[in-house]
Image (cartoon, helix red, strand yellow):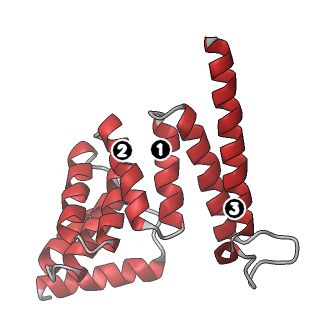
């Protein structure tokens, strides 16, 4: 009887996943973009389909860290910060010291208008991995833009520039200008 129950659950899950995929592909808000070339799927639509697929996989393996992080990333990419935070926070309950997830979660908290929570997560990522440049970059951005802390931002960006070698020249110039302006030079 237990084997029959498992087969039934798998069958029902496949039906649910198929139904979700059909919904995503038929939904008017996921129509093919005018920017997509003929025969190409709109990237947002592809991401929505990926989310449906990942949610189906997660139903069978609810504590799979990789799937949870992928769902956080997919919701990040489709600009759904609340859903992204939901998955990132779940990932952090499984593995609390994951710098990329801490930084991405912080970025989504920033999008949700919660800069203090974002700063907390960026600083936590730096504590876990002091050589993770993206944590410094994002910390500087929130300190400068949301908190008006030019000095704190400059300190974070100096560390970012020290750690990151592959920086767009325009961004590097802008950061150097901000650092110089914060020091009063």
Residue at (87% x, 71% y) in the render:
39
What residue did someone put label 1 on?
A: 68
Q: How crowded is the residue under tag 2: few (<14 C-alpha within 10 Å), some, or many (20+)?
A: some
Front-most of 179 and 185?
179
Contact, CB < 8 Å: mark 3 with mark 1?
A: no
- Position above or below: 62 against 165: above
Residue at (82% x, 78% y) in the render:
37
- Whichever of callouts 2 and 3 sits on the residue coming sooner in the sequence is 3
Residue 41 has which mark?
A: none
Front-most of 106 and 185?
106
Classify residue 29 as left or right of residue 154.
Answer: right
**Tag 2, which secondary structure?**
helix
Residue 90 has which mark?
A: 2
Q: Which is more foreground, mark 3 or mark 1?
A: 3
Q: Quadrant of residue 7?
A: top right
- Position above or below: 36 against 4: below
- Residue 125 horizontal/vertical position (percent): 27, 50
What residue did someone put label 3 on?
A: 23
* Alpha carbon distance from label 2 to label 3: 26 Å
**Residue 4 shows up from this direction:** yes
Dividing the image into 4 quarters, which one contains the C terminus?
Answer: bottom left
Q: Quadrant of residue 104?
A: bottom left
- Whichever of callouts 3 and 1 sits on the residue coming sooner in the sequence is 3
**Tag 3, which secondary structure?**
helix
């Amino acid at each position: 009887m237990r084997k029959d129950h498992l087969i039934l659950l798998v069958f029902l899950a496949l039906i649910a996943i198929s139904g979700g995929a059909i919904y995503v592909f038929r939904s008017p808000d996921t129509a093919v973009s005018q920017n997509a070339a003929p025969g190409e799927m709109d990237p947002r639509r592809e991401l929505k389909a990926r989310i449906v697929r990942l949610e189906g996989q997660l139903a069978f393996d609810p504590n799979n860290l990789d799937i949870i992080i992928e769902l956080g990333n997919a919701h990040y990419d489709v600009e759904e910060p609340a859903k992204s935070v939901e998955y990132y926070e779940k990932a952090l309950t499984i593995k609390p010291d994951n710098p990329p997830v801490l930084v991405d979660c912080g970025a989504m908290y920033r999008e949700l208008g919660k800069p203090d929570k974002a700063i907390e997560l960026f600083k936590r990522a730096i504590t876990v991995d002091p050589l993770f440049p993206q944590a410094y970059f994002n910390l500087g951005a929130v300190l400068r833009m949301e908190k008006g802390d030019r000095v704190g931002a400059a300190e974070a960006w100096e560390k970012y520039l020290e750690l990151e070698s592959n920086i767009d020249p325009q961004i590097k110039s802008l950061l150097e200008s901000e650092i110089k302006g914060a020091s009063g030079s």
